[in-house]
Amino acid sequence: MPSISARIPDDEQDELEAVSELLGEDRSTVIRKALGEGLRELRIRVAIERYQSGDISLNQAARLAGVSLGEWFEIARERNLTSQLSSDELDREADAALDL
């Protein structure tokens, strides 16, 4: 596993220590978990922005977010996303999803 170093503000170091104690895990484990969760959330946020602007389709949004189409539908429901697709486009997306 590669190693990286980063500088963080004092308040974030304090928060890292607090979360590490809360979880009963060492700082490296907490950093790996936070990075993983943060990167996933960033991918989802970008996918949402591009989907909402109409730049990408449902399938493309799911791929960009790194989730299955079913998971994307759950994300869309949880975040009250509106579809940018016409009914014909939704039909094509549904057909494409069945082929997956």
Image (cartoon, helix red, strand yellow):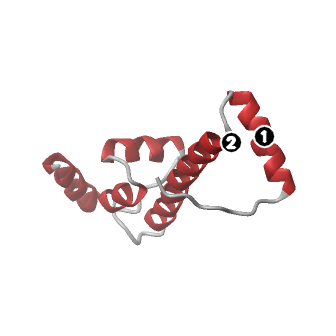
Q: CA distance from mark 2 to mark 1?
A: 7 Å
Residue closer to the observer: 54 or 36: 36
The image quarter containing residue 30 is top right
Viewed as shown, does residue 44 lie left or right of 32?
Answer: left
Q: Position of residue 34 (x, y in %)?
A: 61, 46
Q: Residue furthest bottom?
A: 55
Cβ–Cβ below 8 Å for labels 2 and 1? yes
Q: Residue at x 59, y 61 (%)?
A: 4
Determine whether 40 is above or below 21 in the image.
below
Please tell me the numbered disc located at residue 100: none
Residue closer to the observer: 70 or 35: 35
Determine whether 1 is above or below 64 in the image.
above
Q: Residue at x 33, y 62 (%)?
A: 60
Q: Residues within 10 Å of mark 1 (few under 14, many from 20)?
A: some
Please name the residue that numbered disc 2 is placed on: 27
Q: Residue furthest left?
A: 99
Please name the residue that numbered disc 1 is placed on: 17
Q: Residue at x 43, y 63 (%)?
A: 51
Q: Amino acid at mark 2?
A: Arg
Q: Position of residue 74 (x, y in %)?
A: 43, 40
Q: Position of residue 96 (x, y in %)?
A: 18, 54
